[in-house]
Image (cartoon, rainbow, N blue to C red):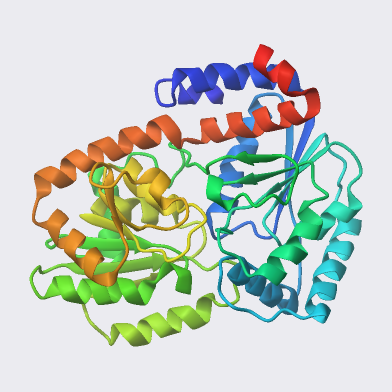
Amino acid sequence: MIERYSGISPKGDLILLRKLADRLADKTFLHINSTREGGGVAEILQRMIPIMSSLGIKARWDVITGDDRFFDMTKKVHNALQGYPETIDEDMWDHHRAVNETNATLLDLEADATIIHDPQPLPLINFRKNGVWIWRCHIDVSNPQKDVFGEIGKYVSKFDAALYSVSRFAGGMSRNEFIVSPSIDPLAEKNRELGRNEIEETARRLDIPLDRPVVLQVSRFDRFKDPTGVIMAYRKVKKYNDCVLVLAGSPATDDPEGAAVLNEVRQFASNDPDVRILLLPPFSDKDINALQRIAAVILQKSLKEGFGLTVTEGMWKGKPVIGGAAGGIPLQITHGVTGFLVHSIEGTAFRIRQLLNNSDMAGRMGQQAREYVRRHFLITRQVRDYLAVWYALSEGMKSLIEL
């Protein structure tokens, strides 16, 4: 399978990936998160597990289950870690632990390396059996609510290492901390090349006009993605440029606030016929791919962001992306080179108009954006990084350098 990436991924990544895999062959690598659908974590794992398996590593992916109370609480934790004020009492923390204790009896936790993704399954560390245990934080914890951060830290300190997407997210919760950026798979349905007929079929089915420029944001319906701010920016642009706004997202089973935010967005759009709000079913990868290729401008106007893989996806399609200067978005967008970083609704509207009115500049930015993703944010590089961290923790830094 790894041979399929030759000529796409950087050659050095593939060489090191094979060397690491040779050292770790036949060992078991377990990933645990809280959902198999919706959001970047699940998408990455869907693509990563087969790649690791093809390299001779016994990779597995398990998902914890919980009730509505559990996911309501973990959403509050997610919000609090991103700086939004939340009240989480001791009963909620007790329920968090109890749900994970039940899951520990249902899961096979025997593995040479285990990665726990985000706060939902964190208490599983209390039931570790063997091997290296790593916590993977995918969210923006640069300015967390201190009491919630402290409770999370009690678990994270028990891990062998913690991984973050951006260096400023690292907070001293683990004695070993590493920076590993997320990635996209260029061969996945969401990112593969599409023919013109496939793109036009999607446009017809989703009622997206092709005779006017399309401004697109793909994201979960989450307040931190600022969908109402996107609509306000579009309204400013609409005074001068005839365009269509598309807000597209899929539900996530571990995000109980999504439906409420979607309703708020629909009400805020005020039945504007040129605002398309699309709630796509899970695994609508081809439709998202087509939408990103249709778009003249792609937005990710996040107020808080762990990384923002929709930025990566848009850049891979050779499109200029306008992103909020938050989380991992500035790691991807070099302002004025691969896209634009914005801090306000007015700034967003200005940059949209700039790209709509200058197709040559938009084309140059898109080409540079695609190459930047190729060099830094493809899945082969992330698998390489995960294996390198595992090897470093199990064999020592000296052996890694000698490799």
**Which residue occupies 22% across, 80% down?**
273
Q: Quadrant of residue 350?
A: bottom left
Q: What is the x, y in percent for residue 38?
A: 55, 60
Q: What is the x, y in percent for residue 288?
A: 38, 55
Number of numbered discs present? 0
Q: What is the x, y in percent for residue 299?
A: 31, 59
Nearer the observer, 213 or 321: 321
Residue 276 visible within the image = no
Q: Is residue 390 above or below residue 114?
A: above
Left or right of residue 15: residue 361? left
**Which residue occupies 68% across, 12% down?**
402
Left or right of residue 363: residue 320? right
Q: Quadrant of residue 361?
A: top left
**Which residue occupies 44% across, 78% down?**
262
Nearer the observer, 151 or 46: 151
Left or right of residue 334: residue 355? left
**Which residue occupies 71% across, 24% down?**
56
Q: Is residue 126 above or below residue 261?
A: above
**Quadrant location, the C terminus:** top right
Residue 292 visible within the image = yes
**Quadrant location, the N terminus:** top right
Nearer the observer, 41 or 175: 175
Nearer the observer, 241 or 154: 154
Q: Quadrant of residue 17?
A: top right
Q: What is the x, y in percent for residue 369?
A: 30, 40
